[in-house]
Amino acid sequence: MSDENVIETGSETNSNYIKRMIKIGLSLLILVLLLVVFISSVMIVKEGEYKVVRQFGEIVRIEKEPGLKFKVPLIQNASTLPKKKMVYDVNEKEINTLDKKRMIIDNYAIWHIVDPDKMINNARTMIGAEARMGEFIFSVIRTELGQMNYEEIINDEQSSRGDLHKRITERVNQLLARDEFGIRVDDVRIKRTDLPDENEKTVFRNMISERESKAQEYLSKGEAAKNRIIAQTDREVTEMLSKAEAEAAQVRAEGEQEAARIYNESFSKDESFYQLYRTLESYKKTIDGETTIILPQDSPYARSLTGYFD
């Protein structure tokens, strides 16, 4: 074989090899492009989230159920919105109560998105939705607490704090539904109520003064009740003693009367004994350790003393 034939055969072999490599490269490139297109068309909707699909900036659909979803690659894109409940910490602000006291209110809200389409159309973003919700919450709280006195707000025994939170939540949801923001508040809670620094000491002094006044009132009522009880008890004791003394005097008189009757019956049976008894009784009254008696010898009293009787 001549040299020219060998060179032509080698050139043909190289050309075929290059063509084959080009075909393989194009096949791989197409495969990669298809893979990229497929991946960019697939989106995964997770539990607790919405997928908002836009085409040229306009919302074409919203995927609400979890699973594997598809979109048109390069033309449509997807963004995520939370479906779960979230906590929004409202900035503390100052309000005036019914009794003209200034208070600083710090509260929070638990909320969630119920209609992503309305939220995006009217609030644009979650930050915008929270801002509008915060404005409504402050407006409602200011109205509600503006109808209550300071003592009712801070004193759990005198206030209906549970009903207050419920009323605020319901009213905020009414305002959000009216403006179609696509969000709902589950609960609004007041976590702290404070006084401005310049008013705190004055209010505390007034509260202490009121408590001291109330304590003094209770003490006065207690002292008056004590005096009434003591007077009533003394009166009852006096009545009981008087009644007991009267009964005792009556019993004593009856006893003396009965004793006198017995004495009379006894003495009437023996006059000599009665004379002796009267003599002995007189000794008790007339004779003691310093008594000196001078009697005639024949006097009846002397005869009785010496043991002689008529």
Image: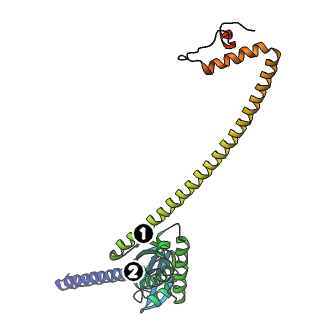
At x 42%, y 79%, the residue is: 101
Point out residue 49 in the picture as x, y percentages from the top left corner: 47, 76
Q: Which type of secondary structure does the marked residue at label 2 adopt? A: strand
> Where is 107 relative to 123, above or below?
above
Q: Nearer the viewer, mark 1 or mark 2?
A: 1
- Between residues 124 and 225, which one lies in front from this camera angle? 225
Q: Which residue appears at 77% of the width and 26% of the height?
A: 260
How was this image coloured? rainbow
Q: Is residue 46 visible?
A: no
The residue under label 1 is 207
Q: Which of the image's four quarters has the N terminus?
A: bottom left
Dot 1 lies on which element? Answer: helix
x, y percent for residue 190: 46, 73
Q: Nearer the viewer, residue 245 or 82?
A: 245
Relative to 251, 58 lies left or right? left
Q: Are marks 1 and 2 in contact (CB under 8 Å)?
A: no
- At label 1, counting other C-alpha atoms closer than 10 Å, the crowd grade (few under 14, some 14-19, many 20 or more) is few
Amino acid bearing label 2? Glu
CA gap between label 1 and label 2 equals: 21 Å
| First in residue order: circle 1 vs circle 2 | 2
Residue carrying label 2: 94
308 over 7 or under it: above or below? above
| Residue 289 picture location, percent across and down | 54, 16
Residue type marked 1: Met
Q: Classify the position of the C terminus by image quarter.
A: top right
Instruction: Say which of 261 and 148 sits in front.
Output: 261
Q: Which residue is at 33% across, 80% downward?
A: 24
Residue 257 appearing in the image: yes
**Quick check: 294 above or below 91?**
above
